[in-house]
Image (cartoon, rainbow, N blue to C red):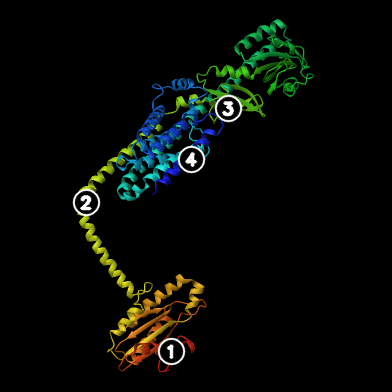
Amino acid sequence: MPAVVPRSVLYLALPVLLFAAWAGGELDQRGILLPLVAVLWLGQLAADRGYRRASRWLLIPVGLATLAIAATYLLAENWLSVAALQHWLDRLPGYWPLFSARPPVLAVCVVFGLTLNVLLLSRLGLGSPMLLLLAALCLSWLTLRSLTPTPLNASSRVGEPLAVVTALWLLWLSQTLALLPVLRRYWQRILPPLTVGGLIALLAMISWHEQRESDNQRLYRLTVSDGDNIATLLASETAAHLKAMRRFTSFWNMLGHTPSRAEWEQQAKRYHDDFGYFRNIAYIDPQGTVIRVYPLRGNRSVLGINLYASGSPAQAALDRPLVYGIEGQTGIVDFLQGGRGVISYLPVRDTIDGTIRGAVGMVVSVDRLLNTLLAQSDNQNRAVTLSGNGQIYFHYGPLGSLADWHYQKMVALGTDETMLSVQPTLEWLLIQRERLPEVTLIFGLLLAYLLHMVLYIYRRLAQQHQLASQANDSLREEMDKRERLQREIEWLARHDELTQLPNRRQLLRWIDARQMQLPMALMICDIDHFKSVNDHFGHPEGDRYLKTLADRCRVPVEQAGGLFARYGGEEFVACLPTCSREQALAVAEALRKTVQESGLILFSGEPVTLSIGVSVTESPPLERDRLFQAADEALYRAKQRGRNRIVEANAHEK
């Protein structure tokens, strides 16, 4: 292949790289990967132009950089922490989050493989085909990840911008096209080691994928467990403060009168201190007026307000204790004094006659409740959100640098069903993710390369050792092959390839060799209406008819000592030396019956039949052309007289 083709492909990668650098958007893997690919392009161009030293000065730093990036995937957290890596990235100008700035491990493997191949000068003996195959496998997987949506519960970046992927493909294609002439020449030597190495690499990639998916599920289960724990704490805390408030209400039931301010503050303070997320605890008279509230600070504005007259959204819940004497509860509502939460109302009854004397209102702040619960958790590397009715009620944790996925669970707050969402941070994912999948991938690819080299060197030594004996064997095989080919050519020159019968040339030679074996009978046989078979059933079916009839008709002719040959199209010729007229007519009749009883049918449903013209020469000299002409004229008369019959050349019809 001319050198201009791989060089043109290499030049084509330049505008793709420029487009990738020009494309806007937030910082992603291009920040680190694109400069590496650009330097790789320059190094490959220098090698293509013959500047080997300049190429090495460019490519060796690229190889070392890719090895350093690969090491960040392999080293354990206690050896090289995520915080330390992020600290180094923070020293660079701009914003470089490790999660998005670090290229995927597949992209790192592709860049390293292409770099190493150029440094090794694309030599077969140094494993260049295996490096290109490994790069192609990794690049194919990377392309698939880049074109498809990000997998659920992903713990790292898995795709690349399509412009960068395209540039890598062009670099790979340029190197492959440059190596293609050598591959074509030595493919038999390369293919077995390449196949074994490719299978091992593929198994390593599949194992890496399965392990990574399993680890992603593990991280998701940790997030699920965290969310379930929060939901459980929320439910148990809600049940606990409701139980406490029932005890608080039972005290006022036994008191028997409306509590004074001092009495109310003395009792409510204890419960308010125990449950720090209470916004206030209020006493409401039977008309819906707030007459007592604790604490007064921040809640003085609600004292003396009639909840029915104020348009409070809690009116329906207030009716339950004041009208029906049962507990009432709101969903998440906006408080009159500001804030948002859930209000529970418990009826206060006279213990003697059961008269409703008022209600105790317990106002729980959603923000305080969830902040109290989440402060008890050790894991602060996640964002917790509570939402419902198209709005967000609560958010805890960071607002940015969060994973693309989250765990959601429905939880009840008062009468509302709200959605609790837990979303881990990217830093937590990087810290918690296992290193084993990447260890499996990188060392699996390394094993594939080394095994390819061992097999390649072994096969090369074995081939050199057997070179002399193989030369003799190949010469002997070549001679045998030519002899077989010559026999096949000679056979094809004398026979019809479809029916395996002697052809016209062989028939004429056979007749000329038997000039003195008189009387000689010649029969020209034509299949009736054969054109309709091809027209209606198709030529493949017509060929099957010809082969079937040839196999059946040659039997009676050869038993009589004659030769049955294909003359052309649907015409066959039977030649019988030393055959009398009566014997010839008997053989002809046998042929006609054989065809009629062959089971082959026409499109009309009628059986396939045969028309035969018979010519017999009894005395010398044997004039071959006249013999054929007489039989052909007899065949013509057989066709005219209705087909499926035998006509002799002397016009006697059988």
Tag 3: residue type?
Ser
Labels 4 and 3: the sequence-earlier one: 4
Task: Tell me if I can see residue 565 in this picture.
Answer: yes
Coordinates of residue 261 in the picture (x, y in percent): 72, 6
Dot 4: what SS?
Answer: helix
Find the residue positioned furthest to the top.
262
Q: Nearer the viewer, mark 1 or mark 4?
A: 4
Query: Pointers 1 and 3 in contact (CB under 8 A)?
Result: no
C-alpha separation, residue under disc 1 versus residue under disc 3: 99 Å
Please tell me in which quadrant of the rendered image residue 579 appears: bottom left
Q: Nearer the viewer, mark 1 or mark 2?
A: 2
C-alpha separation, residue under disc 4 versus residue under disc 3: 38 Å
Can you identify the residue that label 2 sits on?
467
Labels 1 and 3: the sequence-earlier one: 3
C-alpha separation, residue under disc 1 versus residue under disc 4: 75 Å
Tag 2: residue type?
Leu
Tag 1: residue type?
Glu
Task: Tell me if I can see residue 150 in this picture.
Answer: no
Please tell me in which quadrant of the rendered image residue 357 appears: top right
Along the line of sight, the residue nearer the viewer: 195 or 170: 170
Find the residue positioned furthest to the right.
309
Can you identify the residue that label 1 sits on?
633
Can you identify the residue that label 3 sits on?
421
